[in-house]
Amino acid sequence: MTQSKGLHPANAHRDGYDFQALMVSHPPLKPFVRPNAYGNLSIDFARHEAVKALNCALLKHHYGISRWDIPKGFLCPPIPGRVDYLHHLEDLLRQTPGAEGLPLLDIGTGANGIYALLAASRFGRAVVATDIAKASLTNVAAILKANPGLEKLISLRFQSNARHILTGVTQSHERFAACVCNPPFHASAAEAASGTNRKLEGLAKSRGQRHVSGQGKPQTLNFGGQDAELWCDGGERSFLMRLIDESAREPGLCLWFTTLVSKGDNLRPCKRRLAQRGASEVKVIEMQQGQKITRILAWRFETGA
């Protein structure tokens, strides 16, 4: 097992995947496990079925989530990076008076519900999970029903207005320790398709193969993704600006408002907007998994509470 560069010290996946143990915990993973070019056990990360089986094994082996599933074509998230976000967030909340015992707000939980599931199973947090897609919430509800212990900690809410993020799905008297969010990072379906093709080319190159795009067939990716999961009008920057604006209108809703920022170029305009909206403190927490760098943008307001 090769150590993953940059993961949080408490991350269970910091030393890679123990495929032998994972196959024992989740036997359906076994058909996908093969020695890679270096002789180490691995899976073909270009195959959606293989990535999904790996996720099922990881969630069962490390987090006690015995049954997890997503509909075909929906986003299948990489577990190490998702739980890393939560580890860094918990570090921040441990330094924040009043955060203990408060729930998290999971914005755009998706059909996988991964942040809510990990926050509840790994950290014992109650979570309110929201989404603009009823199909996504229906699937998360099925996961919760199959894992009764989590059903008591996680509640689901439908955001009926896709133009809003916090407004309409939260109430003024509510108080959350923090919100978590992984914004859609593309600005259009065409941009998302182009990004998919680049990832497929990268995966093929890592296997010493050549990926040929086009040929009249829709592109699919190992982690999948529906429109609302991958893109929104204006892309990541537009979404982040809306989240900042709505947080300023409800400054006491969360002790910390947080979100992932995939594109580093979006940090500076976000900081400017936060200064304009009167944020009292802003933090950027950098996370690294292998060569990939993502950032958590966190801010809060002085509410006098």
Image: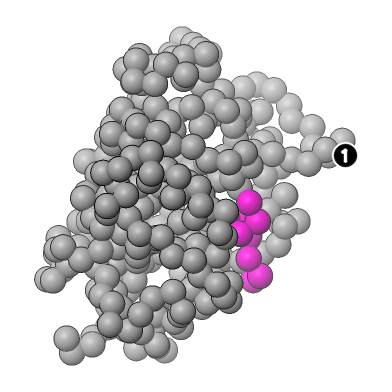
Res. 208 image quadrant: top right
The part of the chain drawn in magenta is: 226-234
Relative to 246, does residue 120 appear above or below in the rendering? above
Res. 176 image quadrant: bottom left
Left or right for 129, reference 52: left
Residue at 45% of width from left, 49% of height from top?
Answer: 140
Location of mark 1 (residue) = 216
Q: Position of residue 126 (x, y in %)?
A: 26, 58
Q: Position of residue 245 (x, y in %)?
A: 46, 83
Furthest residue to the right? 216
Q: Can the viewer see residue 157?
A: yes
Q: Position of residue 214 (x, y in %)?
A: 83, 39
- At label 1, which amino acid type do we have? Gly
Residue at 51% of width from left, 52% of height from top?
Answer: 138
Residue at 46% of width from left, 79% of height from top?
Answer: 168
Left or right for 177, reference 24: left
Residue at 61% of width from left, 22% of height from top?
Answer: 207
Q: Quadrant of the N terminus?
A: top left
Q: Quadrant of the C terminus?
A: bottom left
